Amino acid sequence: MIAQLRQSLRALQKPAGIADGPGALPLGIAAIDAALGGGLARGALHEIAAADEPHLAAAAGFALGAASSRSCLVWIAEDMALAESGAPYGPGLEAFGLRPERLLTVAAAQARNLLWAMEEALRCRAVAAVIGELRHGEIDPVAVRRLSLAAAQSGALALLLRGSPPRDASTAATRWVVSAAPNDCFVVQLTRNRRGPLGSWMLQWSDDDERFVPATHAQPVAAPAADRPHRKVA
């Protein structure tokens, strides 16, 4: 009994899912994976925020790309978020390498219900990742800590999707701010990282590889008009 109590105390004294986590999920981009110490830590909580409301779809896409796996994914959203943006779209999920039949969606009436549902889903051994879509407001730090502990116990990936960059304290392993860019690009900023440095990158999703790759064109390039006559110089 004393040994069990000591183990529980040690678990409370160090960041959940970092020191003793069950490995990492590489994003496939060398610079990002190096900053993360190999990839997104499994068994840990990560926060992904939209730069502002118009960029929420890009933040959701980044969360899906990061969580894509062959196991079950649970997406939990507030009723208002589903009313404003709708439920995840099946063909769009397939574009991110996720079969719709492997997705379980849950609607929550309020933020506290969403956080409770996330914690319960993380404790299920059949679940590989849980995404909780929380649009507005700060989060109780005790609830965030419980999410971190639940993820650490199961080894699942916990992603908290937020409608704007948070200012509240958090035990999350990483925090990201995501915005959309031209040519279907994602601008991702790593603003909190318990494992190493911060950074900013521009990414694209590769349908062939089913993963993110560095963006090839930061700005749209206009093709020359084929029927434009050569301009004479006077």
Image: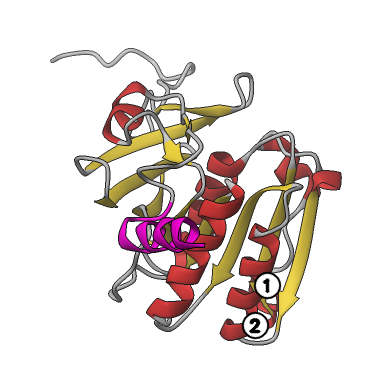
The verdict on residue 192 being magenta is no
Q: Which residue lies most toward the right here? A: 101
Q: Are marks 2 and 1 in contact (CB under 8 Å)?
A: yes
Callout 2: helix, strand or loop? helix
In the rendered structure, which amino acid carries the disc numbered 2? Asn
Residue at 86 percent across and 46 percent down: it is 101
Q: Please name the colour scheme applied to the rendered image.
A: secondary structure
Closer-to-camera residue (107/95): 107
Which mark, by number, is residue 113?
2
Horizontal side of 120 relative to 133 (left or right) equals right
Total count of labels? 2
Q: Nearer the viewer, residue 135 or 40?
A: 40
Q: Is residue 7 magenta?
A: yes
Categorize mark 1 by other alpha carbons within 10 Å: few (<14), some (14-19), many (20+). many
Residue 182 visible here: no
In this image, 196 relative to 12: left or right?
left
Q: Nearer the viewer, residue 76 or 87?
A: 76
Can see residue 94? yes
Q: Is residue 209 above or below residue 167?
A: above
Dominant SS in magenta: helix
The residue sitting at 36% across, 53% down in the picture is: 173
Q: Nearer the viewer, residue 113 or 98?
A: 113
Residue identified by numbered label 1: 117
Q: Locate the C terminus and report the quarter of the image it occupies.
A: top left
Where residue 175 sits in the image (x, y, percent)?
Answer: 34, 56
Residue 11 percent location from the top left of the image: 40, 57
> Which residue reaches farthest front?
2
Label 2 crowd (10 A; few <14 / some 14-19 / many >=20): some
What span is colored magenta in the figure?
A: 1-16
